[in-house]
Amino acid sequence: MVIDPSTTKYMIKANIKAEGIVEKSDVVGAIFGQTEGLLGDELDLRELQRSARVGRIEVELESKGGKSNGTITLPTSLDRVETVILAAAFESIDRVGPCKATIVAEEVEDVRVVRRKKVIDRAKELLNKVLEDSKVNGESIADTVRQAVQIEEIINYGHDHCPAGPNIDKSDAIVIVEGRRDVLNLLKYGIKNVIAVGGTNIPKTVIDLTKERITTAFVDGDRGGILILKELLQTADIDFVARAPQTREVEEIPQKLIMKSLKNKIPAEQYAEMYDIKLEKKDKDIEPKKEKREQKTKQRSEEPVAEKQKVEVSDEKQKNYAAMLDEISGSLKAVLLDGKDKELKTIPVRELTDELKKSDNISTVVFDGIITQRLLDIANNKDIKEIVGIKIGNVVKMPASVRVLTKKDVQ
């Protein structure tokens, strides 16, 4: 009896090598003969075939140089465990006809998965045709088009086969996330330059990629996200840090929170300073990448405030700020001054934002760190007149009331 194709679940695929010339009938006979009684009555091959739980054994052979090689396939409607036991039993066969032989079960294919993939692929083709032919506008069709265009098939990138979006090898900037589901969620909303590390053991593929691209690490808002972030900061060349809201995961947050989290990213150096994380020293090979990144960042931050940066500061103040920066260089400290440039206090950089929020008499901040958008927003709200730091980070909106100076400006 032949198995019903509609009930086939798995397909056993095996390779055979025989030390002589054998025929298909020899192979089939060896399979029936040498597995008889091996697996008990429930998995006896002849009984399984009579009850249509396995199908016909198909054999394809090729003889060359006095030896035979070929493939064996057997469809089954057994469950997964029974099927793999049957496949393993094939490997117990050591003779075919008069010849020594070896059979290796190469694969147990889930026929339903193959069929499902064919259905999905065909459905995509039909959907694309429908969308091309249709001129109907509306919210439902817009959602369908958006998903069809934006959700790309995830790829395996590099020697480590990291889950990634289709644009990972084309973009100057990349986003690093934890796992495959994070990649899929970002792809859903059109972010295609994303790659996953798969845990705290950062793949070399990702480490090498960060040396060439402007890199944002986007992690979960839980303890696991912190651990992965620490590992990334210590092993890879991370430029910016973004985190999902507290207790939330990247794989499940909606588009609005994804965009908000990425918009509020901060420079990696600033994050490391805030949380006392030691960064690994980078190789000279990544300097061109850093220069490129700094040029882009500088262009974005300086264009809205080109006239603002032309405001002159007296030589005396410049010398005073330069001396302060030299004094606190490498200490991750911040000096707070009042309206008469009198020093109020010196604090760690990680406490700076909290101190600014609760103080009302600070006029100038000189600190050993990177000037960020968050810091400028707080300074604007608290009527702080000047911010002096090492350099400007990812700033897109410069407050008109705050004068911004870097170490380069005061030297």
Image (cartoon, grey):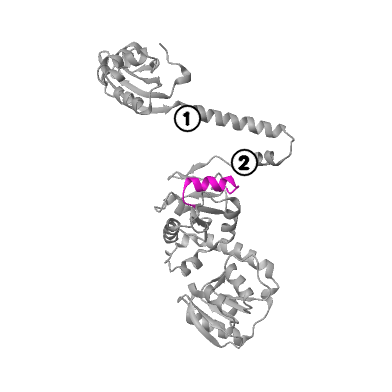
Q: Say which mark, if any, is on residue 351.
A: none
Question: Does 190 lie within the magenta span?
Answer: yes
Give the amino acid at mark 2. Answer: Gln
* Residue 111 position in % (x across, y down): 45, 26
Q: Which residues are magenta?
A: 177-191
Q: Is residue 328 left or right of residue 257?
A: left
Name the quarter where the C terminus is drawn: bottom right
Taking 246 as reference, is 87 above or below it?
above
Q: Between disc 1 and disc 2, whose residue precedes?
A: 1
- Please name the amino acid that badge 1 sits on: Val
Relative to 390, does residue 251 appear above or below in the rendering? above
Decide if residue 90 is in sight here: yes
Q: Which residue is mark 1?
A: 113
Determine the secondary structure under disc 2.
Answer: helix
Q: Quadrant of the N terminus?
A: top left
Contact? badges 1 and 2 (CB < 8 Å):
no
List x then y, in percent, for residue 371: 57, 71
Q: Which residue is mark 2?
A: 147
